[in-house]
Amino acid sequence: MTDAAIRLVLGAARWTGAATLARPFLAGSGAILMLHRVTTRNWSPLGVNAGLAITPRFLDAALTELRRRGQPVVAMDEMLEAVRAGRSHQVVAVTADDAYLDNLTEALPVFEAHGAPFTVYVAPALVSGETLPWWEVAEELVMARDELRLPGRDGEIVLPCRDVGSRRAAARRLMAWLATEVAEAGQQAMLRRLGGTAGTTRRFMNWDELRALAAHPLATLGAHTVHHVALARLPEEEALAEMRDSAAIVARETGARPRHFAYPYGHGAAVGAREVELARRAGFATAVTTRHGVLVPANAAHPHALPRISVNGNFQRLSDLRTLMSGLTTPLANGGRRLVTV
Ligand SMILES: [Zn+2]
C-alpha cells in the first residue's frame, strides 16, 4: 500500500472504532510483520525513505503489546504450521528484508529482551556491495549536487536539486525512473554512471555478521534473490537462478540453507503467478510478498504468496499497528478479499 492508501484505511478504521470489533472475526491465523531498518539514526535526510525505518523503541513497544495481548511471536516454520492448522488465534512472525546492519546492532538486543524469533532475508549482492540499494543512493545523489541529468528515451531529463523541495521531487522522480523505465539488467550500471557509490557508511551486514546471526537461536536467515531484482521483469530462467543461487550462496557462506524467501519489492510489478511457481520449484517452504494482509487458513494453500503487514516508519503508532493486524484493513486494501495471494 502507498502511504496515502494506508492513511485512508487507518483513518476509516480509527473513525469507526471498527478495528477492535473486527479483530475476533477478521484477525485470522497469523500476521507476518515486515521491517527493513531498525535504527535511531536519521539516515533519510529528505524523508523519501523514512517509511523503511522504525526505531528500536517502537519495535520494543510492538513486542510488548503482542505479549500483553497473549499473541505468540513465532519463527516462519511455526507460522506455516499455524496457518496449516487453521489456528483461530493470531500468531505473529517478524521479518526484516535486506539484512541491514542495524538489524544486528539495534534490533537484535530488542528481540533478545523479548525472546522473540525473527527472520532476515538476505540478498548476497547487497552484502558484497555489487548491488547498490538504489532507493537510498538516489537520495544521496540528489543531496550531493545541484542538478541531475537522466538519459531519458525522449531526450535528457533535467532534475534541479536546489532546495529540500526540489531535491525531494528529484529523488522521487529518479527512484521511479530507475524502478520502471530503466531495464532491470541496466539499473546498477545506470546508478553508477550517475555517480552512485556504496558510500562511506556501511548499510548491510557482512558475512561474518550474518554467520553470527545464523548461529543465533532467535534468528533465521531467508533468501531475497542474489541481486535484489524485481523477478517479474526478468526472463524465467534468470528469475529462477536468482532465487536458487541466493539460497545456495547464503548456505555456502553461513552453513544454514534458507527455507524461506522474500520477493524483492513484493508488489504486483515484481511478483506474480509465475514467480510464485518458481519459488515453489526452487524448494522454499514459504515466500512472502509485500501485499498487505493478515493470514487466514486458506493461505495454507498458497505458502509461496504470503502477504505481510508493513511496519511503516511513517506510522509508528501502536493504534495503527493494532488496526493493520485486526484484519479489517485486509479486505479494504484488497478489493474486498480476505484471502490475499498475488
Ligand atoms: Zn528488499
Image: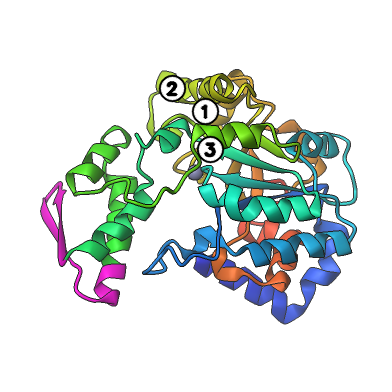
Residue occupying the point 51% across, 22% down: 249
User: Residue at image x 49%, y 40%?
Assistant: 264
Residue at left 24%, top 76%?
Answer: 163
Q: Any atom of ligand 1 within 8 Å of the CB at mark 1? A: no
Residue displayed at 42% across by 68% down = 47
Number of numbered discs present?
A: 3
Looking at the image, can residue 238 be seen? yes
Image position, residue 63 (x, y; %): 76, 59
Q: Are marks 1 and 2 in contact (CB under 8 Å)?
A: yes
What amino acid does circle 3 point to? Tyr
In front: mark 3 or mark 2? 3
What's the CA distance linking mark 3 and mark 2? 14 Å
The magenta segment is: 146-168
The crowd level at tag 3 (other Cα within 10 Å; few <14, some 14-19, many 20+) is: many
Residue carrying label 3 = 263
Q: Quadrant of the N terminus?
A: bottom right
Q: Which mark is residue 98?
A: none
Q: Earlier in the sequence, mark 3 or mark 2?
A: 2
Label drawn at residue 236: 2
Which residue is the site of mark 1? Answer: 274
Position above or below: 175 against 252: below
Q: Position of residue 29 (x, y in %)?
A: 83, 47
Instruction: Give whichever of 15, 67 is nearer the camera.
Output: 67
**Mark 3 residue element:** loop
Relative to 14, does residue 252 appear above or below in the rendering? above
Q: Is residue 2 left or right of residue 86?
A: left
